[in-house]
C-alpha cells in the first residue's frame, strides 16, 4: 500500500511496487519503505529534505528486502541521506542501490546510515558521493562496487 503523505511517500507492507520519475522538493521526508520487497525506485529526484527527528533520512528502508534503486538523485538533506533499519522485528537486507547521486547531507549527518545490527548485504554499485560519510553498525554490512562503463570513440580524423 503506497500513500503520499505530507512528509513524502510511504510504502507499507507491499511487494512488486514500482516508483519512478517523481520529483520531491519540499520540507519533510522523501521516501519511506516499510516491510517492502522486490520493488524498484527509478529516476526519482529527492531534494531539500528538512527532517525533524535525528533518526530520519530522505530515503528510509526499514524491514525491507530485495529492492532495487536505479539512478535516483538525492541532495540537500538536513539529516541523513539513506538509512537502513529494522521494522517490526524484520531486518533490511539484499537491497541494491546503483547509479545513485548522493550529495550534501547536513552537518553531523551521514549519506549512508545503518544504526542497528543485522542490516546485511546493502550493495552500492556506481554510486557517487560528494563527501563519503557513512555509519554502519557492528553486525551490519554494505558493499561498494564500481564498474567501468565501456565506450566507443569514432576517430574520423585517423589520429592514433
Image: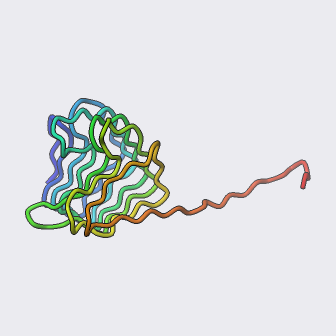
Of the pair 86 and 14, the residue shown nearer to us: 86
Which residue shows up at 23% across the image and 30% down it?
27
Q: Is residue 83 above or below residue 6?
A: below
User: Where the C terminus falls, by quadrant?
Assistant: bottom right
Q: How is the image coloured?
A: rainbow
Tell me where residue 158 appears, x and y as whole percent: 91, 53
* Quarter of the rendering occupied by the N terminus: bottom left
Q: Residue at x 21, y 36 (%)?
A: 51
Q: How many marks?
A: 0
Compared with residue 155, is residue 5 higher up or lower down, i.e. above or below?
above
Q: Position of residue 46 (x, y in %)?
A: 33, 39
Rendered view: 102 above or below 38: above
In this view, the residue in front, 151 or 56, is: 56
**Which residue is drawn at the image coordinates 24% and 66% (left, top)?**
119
The image position of residue 45, as x and y in percent, is 37, 40
Outermost residue to the left: 88
Q: Is residue 151 left or right of residue 97?
A: right
Residue displayed at 17% across by 62% down: 63
From the viewer's perspective, tell me whether residue 17 is left or right of residue 13.
right
Name the outermost residue toward the top: 26
Task: Answer left or right for 34 relative to 16.
Answer: left
Residue 114 placed where, x, y %? 26, 57
Does residue 124 lie above or below 59 as drawn? below
Amino acid at each position: 500500500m503506497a500513500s503520499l503523505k505530507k512528509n513524502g511517500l510511504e510504502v507499507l507492507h507491499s511487494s512488486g511496487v514500482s516508483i519512478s520519475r517523481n520529483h520531491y522538493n519540499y520540507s519533510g521526508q522523501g521516501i519511506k519503505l516499510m516491510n517492502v520487497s522486490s520493488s524498484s525506485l527509478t529516476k526519482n529526484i529527492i531534494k531539500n529534505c528538512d527532517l525533524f527527528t535525528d533518526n530520519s533520512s530522505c530515503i528510509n528502508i526499514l524491514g525491507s528486502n530485495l529492492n532495487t534503486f536505479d539512478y535516483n538523485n538525492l541532495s540537500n538533506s538536513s539529516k541523513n541521506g539513506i538509512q537502513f533499519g529494522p521494522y517490526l522485528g524484520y531486518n533490511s537486507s539484499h537491497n541494491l542501490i546503483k547509479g545513485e547521486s548522493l550529495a550534501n547531507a547536513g552537518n553531523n549527518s551521514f549519506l549512508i546510515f545503518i544504526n542497528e545490527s543485522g542490516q546485511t548485504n546493502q550493495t552500492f554499485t556506481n554510486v557517487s558521493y560528494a563527501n563519503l560519510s557513512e555509519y554502519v553498525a557492528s553486525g551490519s554490512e554494505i558493499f561498494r562496487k564500481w564498474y567501468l562503463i565501456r565506450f566507443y570513440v569514432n576517430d574520423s580524423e585517423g589520429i592514433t
